[in-house]
Image: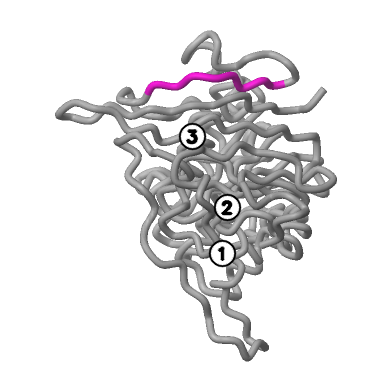
Amino acid sequence: MSLLECVDLHVWFDLPHGGRVHAVNGVGFALDPGERFGLVGESGCGKSTTILALMGLLPSSATVSGRVLLNGADILAGGEDSVRRHRWRDIAMVFQGAMNALNPVKTVGWQIAEPMAYHGTARGARARARVGELLELVGIPASAADRYPHEFSGGMRQRLSIAMALACEPKILLADEPTTALDVMVQAQILELLTRLTGELGMALVLVTHDLPVVSQVCDRAAVMYAGEKVEDGPAERLGLAARHPYTRLLFAATPDLYGEERLATIPGSPPRLDAEITGCPFRPRCDVPTDRCADEHPALRPAGPGHQAACFRNEPQEPM
């Protein structure tokens, strides 16, 4: 049995003047203990919405269907009361934009200790000691517990967010673009920290990013999302070497290479609007190798190798891209 299984997840958002946006369409994946899994794609493809749905943190305008199984039990089935018991204790999250995730008028030590107090895992002197341990774990002196978020750099605030997520020793850590707006050196430090912590603590990691090389470096497996759907998934290394969906291939081609001499590729056009029905393949208007079927038929995920699948009509041995 998988530690976490997301089954046929759908998310709709009601629009103020009528209509709905189908932001996540049938996404599914499984996660084993200690595994590092990447969710990749452009902005607006549904990555962040997917993991917020796993935590039950979407606004009231959202409607969610599907199942999120933690050790076989559906944590969304009982609504907010059900998911609240698992939030931060079994599944924790590092939010995008650490400065906005931290309360500016509370000390960082108070904020790290808050989930412990809520779930009853530690209080008083024991909680303060645990806060010091967590700060040291992410590379910040324990004495910094009495300081406020504005006294730290962007990279340090991201480390504080990670420490807060680890407060109740969760089994799963969701990291939503944890290196956004950080310089290259700090990005590398945060990614190394996440990799080390998942190895030392045995946590599973879901890393949300638009950076495919980062996923290849950090993750064991990855899924590529486009227009709210999963269009390819498999071993992270295989996606880089043998992508079977044009979108994945073009994403890698659009990644700068300091040592390469080829001109940097771009993907023309924009993702489709999700408040209207999409006919055929969602990626067809931007694809460089469309087929006649793409205009009318919606491709389904199909096997593309060991542990590898892609949603493309060219995903067949006799029709290589």
Q: List the single residue furthest toward the left.
A: 17
Residue plotted at (45% across, 66% down): 181
- Specify the label residue 251 is tagged with: 1
- Tell me whether circle 1 and circle 2 mark residues in contact (CB < 8 Å): yes
Residue 238's place in the image compared with 311, above or below, is below
- Residue 211 in which image quadrant: bottom right
Q: Which residue is at the front of the view, 66 or 245?
A: 245
Residue 157 in picture, x, y percent from top left: 50, 57
Q: Nearer the viewer, mark 1 or mark 2?
A: 1
Q: Amino acid at mark 2?
A: Val
Magenta stretch: give its range.
63-70
Q: Secondary structure at mark 1?
A: helix
Q: Say which quadrant the N terminus sits in.
A: top right
Residue 102 visible here: yes
Relative vertical location of residue 16 with respect to residue 183 in this rendering, above or below? above
Q: Residue furthest top?
A: 78
- Circle 2 sits on which residue? 40
Disc 3 versus disc 1: distance between alpha carbons?
A: 24 Å
Depicted 184 relative to depicted 223: above or below: below
Amino acid found under the numbered disc labelled 3? Leu
Q: Residues within 10 Å of mark 1 (few under 14, many from 20)?
A: many
- Residue 52 — which label? 3
